[in-house]
Amino acid sequence: MKRGRPLRAELEPQVIQSIHQSELPFENGLIQNSESISLSDAKEYDSLILLRWRNRQCVECGESFDITSQGFLYKCGVCIG
Ligand SMILES: [Zn+2]
């Protein structure tokens, strides 16, 4: 019987460690941060987990957005057109 690969297996050990060190809740492959993080702050924090933040600040307009509902990378749904 074939089984799907668990999401966690796709993460590298260093990434898992970085996420663990953030001490923030981690669900569905994303860090459940309540306050949005900007691209520069995310880079400064830990570039390994750059694309693991759920709430991000758009690099174009500065608005906060939830990557699970809109947007791409660090651009919100409005700015990606
Ligand atoms: Zn935007």
Image (cartoon, rainbow, N blue to C red):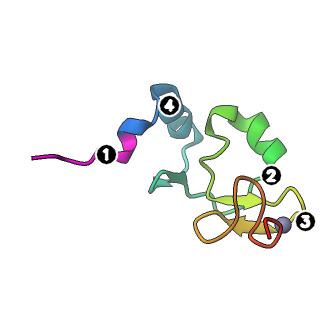
Determine if the C-beta at disc 3 is less than 8 A from ligand 1. yes
Asked if the residues shown at circle 4 and circle 2 are in contact, with their CB atoms under 8 angstroms apart, the answer is no
Residue 61 - label = 3
Say what secondary structure mark 2 lies in.
loop
Residue 17 - label = 4
Q: Nearer the viewer, residue 68 or 14?
A: 68
Mark nearer the N terminus (2 vs 3): 2
Query: Residue 68: x percent and y percent?
Result: 58, 66
Q: Nearer the viewer, residue 51 or 44?
A: 51
Query: Which mark lies nearer to you, 2 or 3?
Result: 3
* CA distance separating discs 4 and 2: 21 Å
Q: Nearer the viewer, residue 33 or 63?
A: 63
Q: Is residue 54 above or below residue 4?
A: below
Question: Position of 17 compared to 41: left or right?
Answer: left
**Residue on which the image places disc 1:** 6
Mark nearer the N terminus (4 vs 3): 4
Few, some or many C-alpha atoms within 10 Å of disc 3 (few <14, some 14-19, many ≥20)? few
Say what secondary structure mark 4 lies in.
helix
Residue 38 - label = 2
Q: Which quadrant holds the C terminus?
A: bottom right
Few, some or many C-alpha atoms within 10 Å of disc 4 (few <14, some 14-19, many ≥20)? few
Indicate the amino acid at tag 4.
Gln
* Quadrant in which residue 13 is drawn: top left
* CA distance separating discs 1 and 3: 35 Å
